[in-house]
Structures are given as C-alpha cells and as structure tokens.
Image: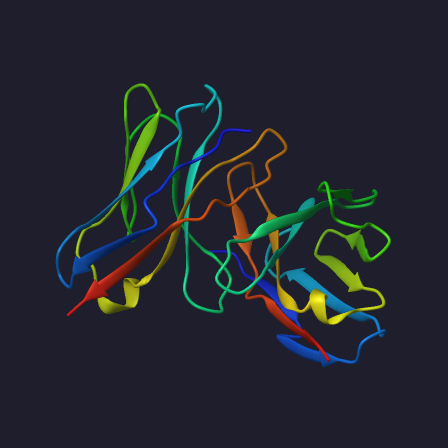
Amino acid sequence: GAVVSQHPSWVICKSGTSVKIECRSLDFQATTMFWYRQFPKQSLMLMATSNEGSKATYEQGVEKDKFLINHASLTLSTLTVTSAHPEDSSFYICSSRGSAYEQYFGPGTRLTVT
Amino acid sequence: DAKTTQPPSMDCAEGRAANLPCNHSTISGNEYVYWYRQIHSQGPQYIIHGLKNNETNEMASLIITEDRKSSTLILPHATLRDTAVYYCIVRGPNNDMRFGAGTRLTVKP
C-alpha cells in the first residue's frame, strides 16, 4: 500500500511553546489529508480535513487558531499546535486520500507537553 | 454520517478464523464500508473495503449482507500478530473516516 510518513515520531515540548508536525504522502499525490488525535485507550477523533491550496475544515470543538493546518502541496500537510498545554498531549495521526477509494494513515506522532 | 456498531472485544484461537461483525444500519446506497486495524501505538492499517459485493484480498475477506446493514470481516487463519483493535468505518460524503470504538481482537495461543 501507499506510504504516509509523519515527522517527528515523538516530541516533548514545554508548556506554552508551539510544535509543528509534518505529514507526507511519499508515493502519491494527496488532494485531501485528514488530521486525527487519539488519547490513551480511546479511538481516533477527526480534528480537521485539509485540502491542498485551501483552508482546512475543522470539526466542531476543535480550535482552528490553536491547531494550525497548512496543506501547501499535494504531498505535504503540517499541523502546528500553538501554545501547547499538557492537555494537548496526545497521539496525532494524519491520513492521505489518494484515489477515490484509497486512504492511508501515517504512523502517528506522540506529543508530550510538560 | 452513517454510524457503526461493533462488539468491544473478541477472542480467537490462533490458527482459527476470526469473524468480526459490524452493524451499519443507516448506511446510504453509495457509501463504502472500510475496515482498518490499529496495533498499539501505531497508525491504522488498511485491511479491506467494499460497497455491495463480498471482497477478498491477501489479508481478509469482507462479507456484506444483501441489505448492506451489516458486514463481517473474516481473518481466515488468525495469528498472534493479528491481535489489534479493528475498526469498521462507513466513509462519509466528504470522504472522511470517522472511527467508532472498534473491536479489540485478542488472538490466543
């Protein structure tokens, strides 16, 4: 299957700082990418849908000014957690949609805010 | 968006078939059913998807009822490495995948 990478795989940051997570589709062009977060022992929760060249669509309850999403090219989307707080500690996962039927997930980024 | 219902957990003996059920009674005619699995601390792995017909690939088989209100994922010969959380998802109109609680499958030796 197609490969989606995320960088970094894990990050520790201090409260109040910002963290950028990259999501790349390595062998296909992704017009749409999705960002999820997952708290321990819970399922994945969709945060936002990102379309290349346009503004992201955020799910209800997700602060767009706190979770900045940029999808500047067909192979790269970034999620920036601004002014991170301990409650933002989570597993962040992206996915990329290739063809009409395929959607592949990245390996995830574990964020710990101290 | 269509919602799915899955049993929270299941056990299966190694080497036996694992049959994971999913209810999606509000599915629309053009919505696909997808199955993914997630092994601890990894991203979800695609398994299979289908619309109306039964599907089979190297990983699993997907059986969809004629009324499309439920489906079953079949792992024909479960191994210990198949222990994971399995998610049944109906893809939304915007191609978004919304995860339910899934089924935690434990394959036992």
Tell me where residue B46 appears, x and y as whole percent: 43, 52
Residue A106 is drawn in which quadrant?
bottom right
Q: Residue at x 63, y 77 (%)?
A: A10
Q: Residue at x 58, y 66 (%)?
A: A108
Pick the residue in front: B74 or B100.
B100
Note whether residue A63 is visible. Answer: yes
Note whether residue A30 is visible. Answer: no
Indicate left or right for B76 with A66 as reference: left
Residue A84 is drawn in which quadrant?
bottom right
Indicate left or right for B57 with B108 as reference: right
Task: Tell me which colouring the rendered structure shows.
Answer: rainbow
Q: Residue at x 63, y 33 (%)?
A: B94
* Residue at the front extreme of this rendering: A87
When the figure is inspected, residue A23 is found, relative to residue B18, above or below; the finding is: below
Pick the residue in front: A72 or A40.
A40
Q: Quadrant of the N terminus of chain B?
A: top right
Indicate left or right for A25 with B76 as reference: right
Pick the residue in front: A97 or A85.
A85
Q: How many marks?
A: 0
Tell me where residue B53 appears, x and y as whole percent: 31, 27
Residue A114 is drawn in which quadrant?
bottom right
Indicate left or right for B70 with B39 as reference: left
Tell me where residue A60 appears, x and y as whole percent: 72, 40
Q: Residue at x 48, y 62 (%)?
A: A41
Tell me where residue A8 appears, x and y as whole percent: 67, 75
When the figure is inspected, residue A15 is found, relative to residue A70, above or below; the finding is: below
When the figure is inspected, residue B3 is found, relative to residue A51, above or below; the finding is: above
When the figure is inspected, residue B68 is found, relative to residue A93, above or below; the finding is: above
Q: Quadrant of the C terminus of chain B?
A: bottom left
